[in-house]
């Protein structure tokens, strides 16, 4: 064919075009991760910082957070008492550092309990129609009770303790996780590979473990992170209105509850635990946002 | 009508997108023009930049992440230099557009009448009542029965073909001089396709609009267009009259396109064309600058020259432009 | 349309029934002896027995539940252990401040959050968007009472623009009512604004990518009309859904906000009841708020038909 032979007049190159946009910046692997998921990087770093702070509280220049010293009551922040002292003379700095323990225990405790119970209920009711009808009606009813009020009612009926706070908040959170998991299960059930497994006679527990569970984990982990954050706020709220952790335990909510009476004259007693609580919750929420974007793009679109 | 200046003259259009993975060069140096009343088809595979070209004309590209460079002269005015309000006055009025997906291109929560009437309210300052009247007229024009009832209905109450008619009614409501139709029939049934094409041809003669028809369906091209622009990997690789492109395709990519089109009875006289041929290989990534000819990776006649030097687009036959080093020059043009 | 309304209304009845059953059974679910806990540490065995009898814990669950439900349906929520007054009466006295606060918060929050979310979606990726998102994460992370104290300290104590605490009934003039409720409404609204702004932004981002928005733009529709007519109406259903769901948080937040700003509302009533272990009051308030929440979500369901012509089942 004539097309394979050289044309007699040689070749004309196309004119070069200028770049319209600046080229992409080159980044290292770690840099690229931080660039794509800045919230995971920042949130994760800050959460680890708070966890370390809670673990190593005794080493962080603290004193006994429950030691009373009536002689030095309500001292403002100074070189000696970094965050001042409360009305019983206790060192607010030490109380705030130790308070991280309660917040994190409640946050992680609720996240783990609510996620596992919710995962269990959601899986079962997503797979067994008869259970689904009953369980989901109950969950609807429970979700219609504002969660703080539900926790208040339960705390009013039990003795104040960290465990009971965790239980009360968990019960209020379980319906949300169950609904989420059930929704995922119902969509997964329709997937051809799951239908094929059912048709092939694979036993239900096997299908749940092999095909369903792995796919529900990502949304549950994301949800658990947000539950952790909201549980820390719930604990502080409950303690603040006197329905939470026993007053003897220095939790951030308790410190604020005790500072409440004096907030107009000694605002720092409320201020420091408030700042710590807010930043901790913020870090967990940032981490959750990042995880959602990274793990669960379907959900990321929705909220 | 003056024949000298084209209605639309695109010069060296570049539309790039900044993404997290680098710059995507969706359209790279495309030039062509459309005369008043003419129908020009832009063909190519999906992802070749034909839709982005169309969207660039109306400046429907989000900037950022996109960026449009070059010149888009509409009646001598560079659209890329207009302010956003000036551009709004042109959209839907002088230039309007029909989209591929009639099912999703209409707003589900607004009535059909409202959506057609909005155009004339915006551009001709009609009252809501007059706009509805015009909407009814337009629905009649595009052949929708019971238009007075239909204007009060929502898109979900209409079939796909009806919705595309509504889209056309909307696009033609202000008698535009240029209609950009982006695959107007792709999503429709074959029988409905024919009706819609018939309607477009009919309305074109009545309204006198030029049409830029984007399609990958060569049958539609043959039926509708006077001239054809072939695009590949964001570039124009060939341009010519319908007859030239169909009977004498010069670029190996265009030949491939023709070869991949089933032809009735072609085996009778040409044994080599009896099978539906497909073009081997993949479209090059647009994320990296392409060195050499963009088609080099798939071209059956590729040489080292092609891999190193991008071919200029040249007139190798009268009014027939090709970007290929090895396209034969017709005797008349040489 | 009518059938849809009737069906939705009927669907709330079993939900309310389950709410009632659950709230009632808390007394039985709670670990330990609720009568002893309510009576307190210094109570004599006789006190405990008296409370046990008054709570009906000495009789079978189902008998007691049906009796209780029957009385609740007649508006009788029991009698306070502390004041011996009917709970329904105590709640009724305190409804005005609470509903005033919620109404003001809702109005304020929606009129801030929706424009914020719309603009953030429109200016996606710019500093305005980042600012809104930052605000949204902060709103979720800072507890209501902390926001309350910061506002009270700044705008009431330091600047003296608003009263520090208290409530003026609407009947005493709208000026005092508004000035007393402004700071509480802003505090209570912060988390709600965060929630609504976020969902508005996310939904708008999705809607703005739809083909019909491109169609509108191709017609020459201006930016404002695209955002607030073509896009927002399509985003309305997810947004009002979240408004309904978020109402629970608003109720919970109101309880705390009323404590911070000493507003004599239902929330304050429940906090006082906690300190006195006055369970009938707590139970009554929980029930009242839960029913309110169910009704709010019923209204949301009915509003769907206003915004989306496709919902007519």
Image (cartoon, coloured by chain):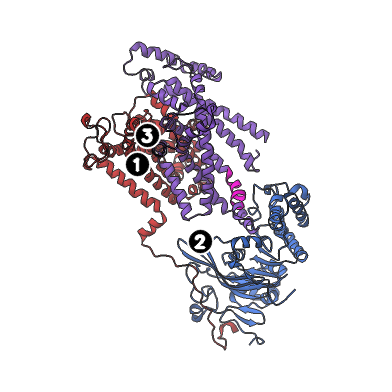
Chain colours: A red, B blue, C purple
- Badge 2 and badge 3 in a common chain: no
User: Where does residue B333 sit, x and y in percent of width and height?
Assistant: 65, 86
Residue C222 in which image quadrant: bottom right
Tell me the mark number nearer the camera, choosing from 1 and 3: 1
User: Magenta span: helix, strand or loop, mainly?
Assistant: helix
Whether residue A131 is visible here, answered yes or no, is: no
Residue shown at the point (52%, 37%) measured from the top left: C106
Label 3: chain letter: A
Give left or right: position of A44 versus A146. Answer: left
Using the image, tell me which numbered label, if any, was put on residue B65. 2
Give left or right: position of A233 versus B45. Answer: left
Q: Which residue position is annotated with label 3?
A: A235
Using the image, tell me which numbered label, if any, was put on residue B209. none
User: Where does residue C72 sit, x and y in percent of width and height?
Assistant: 53, 19
Q: Are marks 1 and 2 in contact (CB under 8 Å)?
A: no
- Which comes sooner in the sequence, label 1 or label 3? 3
Of all residues, the one furthest to the front in this rendering is C160
Residue shown at the point (46%, 26%) measured from the top left: C264
Residue B57 in which image quadrant: bottom right
User: The magenta stretch spans which residues?
Assistant: C225-236
Q: Nearer the viewer, residue C51 or B283?
A: C51
Label 2: element kind: loop
Q: Is residue C265 above or below residue B217?
A: above
Label 1: chain letter: A
Say few, some or many: other residues with alpha carbon within 10 Å of mark 2 (under 14 / 14 to 19 / 20 or more). Answer: some
Q: Which residue position is annotated with label 1?
A: A275
């Amino acid at each position: 064919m004539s097309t394979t032979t050289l044309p007699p007049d040689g070749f004309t190159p196309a004119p070069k075009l200028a770049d319209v946009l600046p080229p992409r910046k080159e980044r290292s692997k770690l840099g690229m991760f931080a660039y794509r998921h800045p919230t995971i990087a920042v949130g994760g770093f800050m959460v680890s910082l708070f966890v370390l702070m809670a673990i190593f509280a005794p080493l962080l220049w603290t004193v006994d957070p429950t030691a009373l010293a009536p002689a030095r009551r309500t001292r403002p922040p100074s070189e000696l008492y970094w965050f001042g002292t409360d009305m019983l003379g206790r060192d607010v700095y030490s109380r705030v550092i130790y308070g991280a323990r309660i917040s994190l225990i409640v946050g992680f405790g609720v996240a783990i309990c609510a996620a596992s119970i919710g995962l269990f209920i959601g899986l079962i009711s997503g797979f067994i129609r008869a259970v689904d009808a009953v369980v989901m009606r109950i969950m609807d009813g429970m979700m219609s009770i504002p969660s703080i009020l539900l926790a208040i009612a339960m705390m009013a009926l039990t003795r104040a303790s960290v465990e009971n706070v965790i239980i009360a908040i968990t019960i209020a959170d379980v319906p949300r996780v169950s609904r989420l998991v059930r929704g995922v299960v119902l969509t997964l059930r329709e997937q051809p590979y799951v239908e094929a497994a059912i048709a092939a006679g694979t036993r239900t527990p096997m299908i749940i473990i092999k095909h369903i569970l792995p796919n529900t984990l990502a949304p549950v982990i994301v949800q658990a992170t947000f539950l952790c954050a909201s549980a820390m706020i719930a604990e502080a709220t409950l303690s603040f209105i006197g329905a939470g952790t026993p007053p003897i335990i220095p939790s951030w909510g308790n410190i604020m509850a005790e500072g409440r009476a004096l907030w107009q004259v000694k605002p720092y007693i409320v201020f420091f635990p408030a700042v710590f609580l807010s930043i901790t919750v913020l870090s967990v929420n940032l981490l959750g946002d990042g995880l959602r974007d990274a793990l669960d793009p379907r959900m990321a679109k929705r909220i | 009508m003056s024949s000298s200046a084209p209605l639309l003259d695109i010069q060296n259009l570049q539309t790039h997108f900044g993404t997290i993975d680098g710059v995507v060069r969706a359209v790279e140096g495309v030039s062509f023009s459309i005369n008043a009343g003419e129908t020009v088809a832009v063909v190519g595979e999906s992802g070749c930049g034909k839709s982005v070209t169309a969207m660039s004309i109306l400046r429907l590209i989000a900037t950022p992440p996109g960026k449009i460079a070059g010149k888009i002269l509409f009646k001598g005015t560079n659209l890329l230099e207009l302010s956003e309000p000036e551009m709004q006055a042109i959209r839907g009025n002088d230039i309007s557009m029909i989209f591929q997906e009639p099912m999703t291109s209409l707003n589900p929560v607004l009535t059909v009448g409202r959506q057609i009437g909005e155009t004339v309210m915006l551009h001709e300052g009609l009252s809501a009542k007059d706009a509805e009247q015009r909407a009814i007229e337009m629905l009649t024009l595009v052949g929708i029965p019971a238009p007075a009832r239909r204007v009060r209905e929502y898109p979900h109450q209409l079939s796909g073909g009806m919705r595309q008619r509504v889209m056309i009614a909307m696009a033609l409501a202000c008698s535009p001089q240029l209609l950009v139709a982006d695959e107007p029939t792709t999503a429709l049934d074959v029988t409905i396709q024919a009706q819609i094409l018939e309607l477009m041809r009919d309305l074109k003669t009545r309204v006198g609009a030029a049409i830029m028809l984007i399609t990958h369906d060569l049958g539609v091209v043959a039926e509708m267009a006077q001239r054809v622009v072939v695009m590949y990997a964001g570039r124009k690789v060939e341009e010519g009259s319908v007859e030239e492109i169909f009977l004498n395709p010069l670029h190996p990519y265009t030949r491939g396109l023709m070869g991949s089109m089933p032809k009735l009875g072609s085996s009778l006289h040409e044994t080599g064309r009896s099978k539906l041929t497909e073009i081997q290989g993949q479209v090059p990534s647009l994320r990296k600058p392409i060195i050499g000819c963009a088609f080099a990776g798939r071209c059956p006649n590729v040489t080292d020259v092609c891999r190193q030097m991008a071919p200029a687009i040249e007139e190798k036959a009268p009014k027939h432009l090709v970007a290929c080093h090895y396209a034969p020059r017709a005797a008349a043009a040489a | 349309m009518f059938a849809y309304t009737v069906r939705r209304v009927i669907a709330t009845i079993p939900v309310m029934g389950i709410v009632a059953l659950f709230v009632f059974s808390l007394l039985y679910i709670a670990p330990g002896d609720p009568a002893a806990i309510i009576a307190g540490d210094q109570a004599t065995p006789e006190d405990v027995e008296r409370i046990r009898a008054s709570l009906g814990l000495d009789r079978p669950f189902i008998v007691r539940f049906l009796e209780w439900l029957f009385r609740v349906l007649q508006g009788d929520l029991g009698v306070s252990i502390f004041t011996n007054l009917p709970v329904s009466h105590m709640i009724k006295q305190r409804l005005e401040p609470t509903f005033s606060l919620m109404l003001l918060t809702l109005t304020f929050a929606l009129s801030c959050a929706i424009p914020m979310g719309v603009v953030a979606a429109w200016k996606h990726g710019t500093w305005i968007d980042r600012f809104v998102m930052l605000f949204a994460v902060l709103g979720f992370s800072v507890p209501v009472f902390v926001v309350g104290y910061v506002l009270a300290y700044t705008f009431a104590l330091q600047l003296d623009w608003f009263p520090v605490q208290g409530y003026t009934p609407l009947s005493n003039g709208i000026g005092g009512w508004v000035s007393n409720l402004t700071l509480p409404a802003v505090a209570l609204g912060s988390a709600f604004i965060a929630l609504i702004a976020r969902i508005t932004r996310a939904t708008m981002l999705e809607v703005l990518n739809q083909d019909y928005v491109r169609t509108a733009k191709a017609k020459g529709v201006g930016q404002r009309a695209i955002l607030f007519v073509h896009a927002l109406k399509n985003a309305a259903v997810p947004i009002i859904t979240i408004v309904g769901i978020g109402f629970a948080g608003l109720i919970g937040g109101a309880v705390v906000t009323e404590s911070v700003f000493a507003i004599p509302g239902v929330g304050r009533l429940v906090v006082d009841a906690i300190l006195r272990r006055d369970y009938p009051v707590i139970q009554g308030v929980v029930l009242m708020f839960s029913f309110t929440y169910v009704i709010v979500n019923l209204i949301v369901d009915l509003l769907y038909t206003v915004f989306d012509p496709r919902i007519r089942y």
